[in-house]
Amino acid sequence: MDYFAQQLINGLVLGSIYGLIAIGYTMVYGIVGMINFAHGDIFMIGGFIALISFLVLVSFGLTAIPLVLFVVLLVSMAITALYGWTVERIAYRPLRHSFRLAPMLSAIGMSFVLTNFSQVAQGARVKPVPPIITGGYTLHEGPAGFVVQLSNIQIIVVLATVVLLALFTWLVSSTRLGRDMRACEQDQTMAALLGVDVDRTISMTFVIGAALAAVAGMMYLLYYGLVDFFMGFVAGIKAFTAAVLGGIGSLPGAMLGGLAIGLIETFWSAYFSVEYKDVAAFSILIVVLIFLPTGLLGRPEVEKV
Amino acid sequence: MKSLKLIGLALGASLALSASAFAQDITIAVAGPMTGSESAFGRQMKNGAEQAVADFNAAGGVLGKKLKLEVGDDACDPKQARSIAEKLSGARIPFVAGHFCSSSSIPASEAYADGNTLQITPASTNPLFTERKLWNVARVCGRDDQQGLVAAEYIIKYFKGKNVAILNDKTTYGKGLADETKKALNKAGFQEKLFESYNKGDKDFNSIVSRLKRDNIDLVYVGGYHQEAGLILRQMRDQGLQTILMAGDALNDKEFATITGPAAEGTLFTFGPDPRNKPTAKAIVEKFKAKNIDPEGYTLYTYAAMQVWSQAAAKVGSTDPKKVMDAIKAGEWDTVLGKMAFDAKGDIKAIDYVVYKWDAKGNYTEVNPKGS
């Protein structure tokens, strides 16, 4: 039981990180109808910016960790959002009315550009940081000496995810921007005729998605203690899978998909073999898509005649 | 008239080319990752080779001829290693010191064998390198099965009756090392409690760590590189697990301590005794220091590889790779690393591994033979 509880914690934290990245995929898909393959790399850029701004602040002699982390969070969200905006402006907007595959190919190209850019600019080695947030709680001590441990950083990751999810669900459902987004999702031409600035709304979607990716990147840096130029690829694939599993286009679906993938991976490695955890996760994806082609929470697309 | 000029130019160029061929230099090469993520090691190899060539030439060259050094860059990519090897052996270079990664040295050695070039690696430890009955390969470093043996001896001595787990990352290096350690342990009647593999590049090991916790593991042996080993260690400490981590020579990198922070304290790994401390290396180390180069890691191994070849070539009186290789395997050679003799496969005869321990300040020291 204790073992199960510990693995549950592990899975929830891993799933939260996947979910944070998956939200970015799902938002863009919902509105523009394209898969933004560069999103994983935006996440990686977010991690790097968090690392760089952290080191800069520390070198200025700031030592109050909560303050430093708060500033780092704002800085990396702002700069990564700028990246998201630029990517959309350069690589996607000129192709918006082109054939359907064009922006997707351009996204794959953008992904390579960002990966190689950070490899050249930051070097190919991993960039570690010493543990920043340490300590934790012992929840329960089993009779066999097995301790269920919950670390502070795990609490922060899960809390940040829950807060952000609530915030963005509210943003999409109850604000002017959210209404514009939903309007663009349904019909861009009609939305434009009714006075919605489509270009601006789509830009904002990318900006918000990138800011979320920056939060995920920073959580990743704090939790695992390192970033490298290649980490966006695997994390991006996992998060994309999570978005599809949860039903692409749905915000709670992305979160649910992220948690599902994280938990499957963790429990598979806990009770079966570590080697096949990815096989397990992707097999479940296939099974779900056979029976629910739109994912767990996705709505079927209605073809208008 | 224009074509005549062109012909003249071509003639002149070919004369210039053949002139350099007539200059009677012997060209040899060093090949390794001069760029890419392992480039620090490539630089060590290049430093060692350049110093060796300069020293040999100052002492009159080899067979009365001056040596010239060519540098090949494989970036630790097997395909690039193969094409570098074809290029070097196509240029009729008799000897190459290289490569670094086992996954580069192995495919390159086949191209060298076809092209009649002798290859001595200063760093590739995978057993397969010398196990394929190629005539042209030798190495001046140890093998992973010897490394596994040394690790197993240590585990049996200090962790008898305790729980041991073995993990590996499924790479040529990591899996090979974990398998050899397991083999050596089982042979001595020591059964590990858990044998698992993970993917190189994974970041989340919490699930494995909880398993280690459930099985009350006292020591986990990791066949893998420093990045994953560092993350495993860090996540063990986060989950309140005080298990000791042990690994192979890949932990010989200061970056490991930056990933783990003070948690590195007590971590064990196997590596050759520091060559810089050997009495035979003293004079050469001084020369490097004078140039402001720290002859760390594989620098002196590369120097030693060059010494073995030049001494053998001098003894045979020819650079013919086959004759030189026969001489290398038959004789005993004075190198910066001490006296060196090779078996029929091309491996060094002495086992050359010791156990090191990390401390909390991010340094490692040799564990004294009594075990502290």
Image: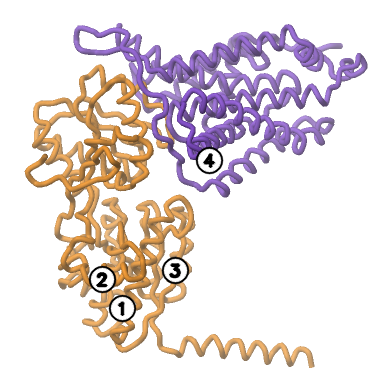
Chain colours: A purple, B orange
Q: Give, as a three-letter code, the residue at label 2.
A: Ile
Q: Which mark is residue A229?
A: 4
Among the two numbered marks 1 and 3 on one chain, the one whose residue lies closer to the N terminus: 1
User: Circle 1 is placed at which residue position?
Assistant: B55
Measure how far apart labels 4 and 2 are at the Cα level.
38 Å
Task: Report helix, strand or loop for mark 3.
Answer: strand
Residue B364 located left or right of residue A282: left
Task: Report helix, strand or loop for mark 2.
Answer: helix
Measure how far apart labels 2 and 3 are at the Cα level.
21 Å
Disc 2: CA contacts within 10 A as few (<14), some (14-19) or many (>=20): some
Q: Position of residue B259 (x, y in %)?
A: 38, 37
Q: Quadrant of residue A73?
A: top right
Dots 1 and 2: beta carbons under 8 Å?
yes
Q: Nearer the viewer, residue B86 or A45?
A: A45
User: Circle 3 is placed at which residue position?
Assistant: B71
To the question of a shared chain for discs 2 and 3, the answer is: yes
To the question of a shared chain for discs 4 and 3, the answer is: no
Dots 4 and 2: beta carbons under 8 Å?
no
Q: Nearer the viewer, residue B212 or A297?
A: B212
User: Circle 2 is placed at which residue position?
Assistant: B284
Q: Is residue B114 above or below residue B130?
A: below
Among the two numbered marks 2 and 3 on one chain, the one whose residue lies closer to the N terminus: 3
To the question of a shared chain for discs 1 and 3, the answer is: yes
Query: Mark 1 or mark 3, which is nearer to you?
Result: 1
